[in-house]
Amino acid sequence: MPGFFSGRIWRALLLASCTLLAACGDKAANWTLYDIKGHLPDLSFQLDGAGGKKVSSDDLQGKTVLLFFGYASCPDICPTTMAQLTAVLQQLGEQADKVRIVFVSVDPHRDTPDILQAYVDAFNNKAIGVTGNEKQIADLARRYRVAYQIEKPRPGDAADVYDVTHSRGVYIFDNAGKARLLASDTDSIDAIVKDLRQLIDITS
């Protein structure tokens, strides 16, 4: 993606912050992913979903949530991540019923809720696409320390032709809405499946 944050820079920042968190994490579990228990706020949002409906964190009570920020026309990271998470749910088998993917668009000008839901539906039926106005998205991104930037259209370009940059990572919340784990783009499907099974087991 033109202008996308360097993968090396993102991984370095992620590793630096999460290494500090690991020492204070969940001692009872053997996590492969980054343990962020107690270091990020609980899951909390109310945004626009498909069909004119509001979607909130209250609707996800009792579910393990995989929260991901991106946008529907992203050419690489977002579809790769969605495909990876779909494979994770497939490997979880019956436990997948206890998990929901929440894809938050940081590009509300192009991503209507219906467009976004159609996008995630193309991957699996356990994903929810949500967006909101600029302030709502900025507030939620700030809450979970997500960086993104929308570039202004260049002279001569159409108003809807512009680049979007955003940090990558999947935030995992337990069935009580507590932040528990952070998966980076270098984590394997098997690693995510292992930790999700463990998280579901210890919070059931």
Image: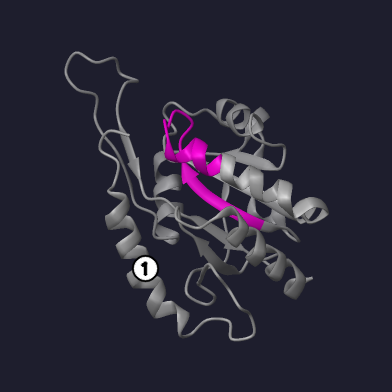
From where the camera sits, is residue 48 visible?
no
From where the camera sits, is residue 148 visible?
yes
Residue at 37 percent across and 50 percent down: it is 167
Residue at 66 percent across and 64 percent down: it is 194
186 part of magenta stretch? no
68 part of magenta stretch? yes
How far across and down, in percent of the image, does residue 46 sit? Answer: 58, 49
Q: In this view, does 183 lie above or below 25?
A: above
How far across and down, in percent of the image, does residue 69 sit? Answer: 47, 46
Query: Quadrant location of the N terminus?
Result: top left
Instruction: Residue 84: name its quadrant.
Output: top right
Residue at 44 percent across and 60 percent down: it is 143
Magenta-highlighted residues:
65-82
How far across and down, in percent of the image, does residue 148 sit? Answer: 34, 46
Q: In this view, does 137 lie above or below 24?
A: above
Front one among 185 and 46: 185
Front one among 149 and 125: 125
Query: Quadrant location of the C terminus?
Result: bottom right
Front one among 137 and 150: 150
Question: Dot 1 corresponds to which residue?
Answer: 15
Q: Which amino acid does label 1 sit on?
A: Leu
Instruction: Residue 133: name its quadrant.
Output: top left
Q: In this view, does 108 lie to the left or right of 149?
A: right
What kind of element bears circle 1? helix
